[in-house]
Image (spheres, rainbow, N blue to C red):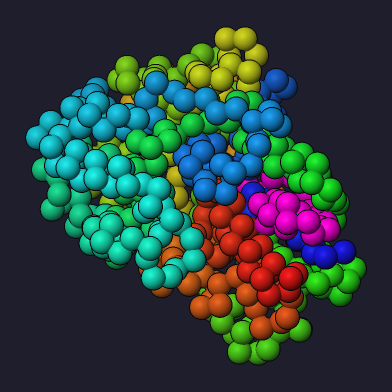
Amino acid sequence: MDAIVIGAGPNGLAAAIELARCGRRVRIYEANPTVGGGARSAELTLPGFIHDICSAVHPLTAGSAFFSTLPLARYGLEFIHSPIALAHPFDDGTAAILDRSIQTTSENLGRDGAAYRDLMTPLMERWQDLADDILGPPRFPKHPFLAARFGIHAIRSAKSFAESRFKEDKTRALFAGMAAHSFLSLDQTATAAFGLVLGLLGHVYGWPIPKGGAQNIANALAAHFKDLGGEIVTNQRVESLSDLPAAKAILCDLTPRQVLHIAGGSLPSGFRRKLSRYRYGPAAFKLDWALSAPVPWRSPECAKAATVHIAGSFAEILTSEKLANSGEHADKPYIILSQPTLFDPSRAPLGKHTLWAYCHVPNGSQVDMTEKIENQIERFAPGFRDCILARSVMTPAHFEQHNANLVGGDINGGSQHLAQMFTRPTARMYSTPLEGLYICSSSTPPGGGVHGLCGYHAARLALRKSLK
Ligand SMILES: Cc1cc2nc3c(=O)[nH]c(=O)nc-3n(C[C@H](O)[C@H](O)[C@H](O)COP(=O)(O)OP(=O)(O)OC[C@H]3O[C@@H](n4cnc5c(N)ncnc54)[C@H](O)[C@@H]3O)c2cc1C
């Protein structure tokens, strides 16, 4: 055996594929009965209703510089684009939108149209060069002027950036809603980066959903890996490195806490200390519903978007994210919602629908947010509750039971604040002091999301150092 990968999440699968396509013999051990980690789907509510357990919306997958080199369509992966990528409704019945077209998006932003166009157009035109520099391990940029142009905005907090760049509360709310995917308080340095990157991805690739559910991303990756000669052993939790057969490289699709669990005794104490100081971020509290009818949105734009951000005003999002980051719970939480069956009827019985939504809560929270989330949806879609046939609740504890990587319900493999954004989980990033042991999960750059880039970069390093 040349290499073993622990964990069949998107990054574990990506690492394994990169090694296998370079001719190495690779085996993956996965604790769960199915592959996919944070990219899985299941009947969480009623028979025939397929829900995404974790990831639902995939701009990072469609835009991944690694996945785009793989023949995933041959293995059945198909992306569906809703007419509008994202809608953000307001109490007055209107909605801001993120459209593939910058022109269409900006036409809807009132006095901010020109400011938005002037911000996004030059960055979008050079997206490929920019992505090269920002979505990977930190290094001196290949395109320094472009990186500086992006960096001068990205380094700011989303709050101060939105306040200085935009005049309309609705534009600020649209931008803050995207930046809030960071799980950070939006007055923190560099949170503007998340709003910019997600907005740019929307213009370049859209925010597509995979036909049939996120499981089909994982299934396509796994099928491709097997065709390259790879082996996957499911239902096999690795408890210690000493359980594993001999291999020249071991790549862990794990966060620092599990790396410490399986390899702690073999790691030098200084490195163990660094891993134990690694910070996890706030958690997700998630609901999935089986619905008898589509969500009755007040704003017609919302029915055209696979993703809807719910929070109302800019101030509400700032408050919600600040509270989740300071151990408290918002009464009106910011919610990320996905309504796939409006555009992919294959996931529910004829005429019926699924709905996926989560809000941010403090790490390890035990507070039930069901009513608050449903109140928020009802606020912008009166009559929503009448459509509910069944509901599944996933608390931070459920997430961690379902996947040990979701520590305290943190879905990004660790907080993505500036100090942990580039040099995660330590300044060594993918490597460890133990020869042949690597970390390839979203606890390495470029962090959370289904893009496989952490796995790809870890595999490239292992190929150079251990698998020549
Ligand atoms: C609720 C939620 C919503 C999300 N929404 C989105 C979204 O819309 N778009 C997006 O791009 N991303 C989203 N994400 C984030 C995305 O799912 C993760 O960033 C991504 O899955 C990380 O991939 P990974 O391979 O690093 O780790 P994971 O996907 O967590 O995979 C790790 C794998 O390792 C296995 N494992 C753990 N310990 C062991 C062990 N000891 N032995 C063997 N196997 C082990 C786990 O079972 C798991 O399969 C979401 C996540 C959650 C939880």
User: In which quadrant of the rendered image does the N terminus lie?
Assistant: bottom right
Q: Residue furthest top?
A: 351
User: In which quadrant of the rendered image does the C terminus lie?
Assistant: bottom right
Q: Is residue 112 magenta?
A: no
At 12% from the left and 31% from the top, the residue drawn is 110
What segment carries the magenta color? 12-38
Q: Is residue 184 left or right of residue 54?
A: left
Percent of width and height locating residue 173: 25, 41
Percent of width and height locating residue 448: 52, 55
Is 253 rendered above or below residue 109?
A: below
The count of marks equals 0
At 37% from the left and 25% from the top, the residue drawn is 84
Percent of width and height locating residue 17: 71, 51
Camera-side residue of 155 and 402: 155
Camera-side residue of 101 and 83: 101
Is 464 rendered above or below residue 94?
A: below
Residue 141 visible in the picture: yes
Q: Residue furthest bottom?
A: 269
Q: Is residue 31 magenta?
A: yes
Q: Is residue 320 left or right of residue 27?
A: left
At 41% from the left and 59% from the top, the residue drawn is 134
Residue 265 picture quarter = bottom right
Residue 290 picture quarter = top right
Q: Is residue 266 left or right of residue 209?
A: right
At 56% from the left and 77% from the top, the residue drawn is 428
Is 112 rendered above or below residue 188?
A: above
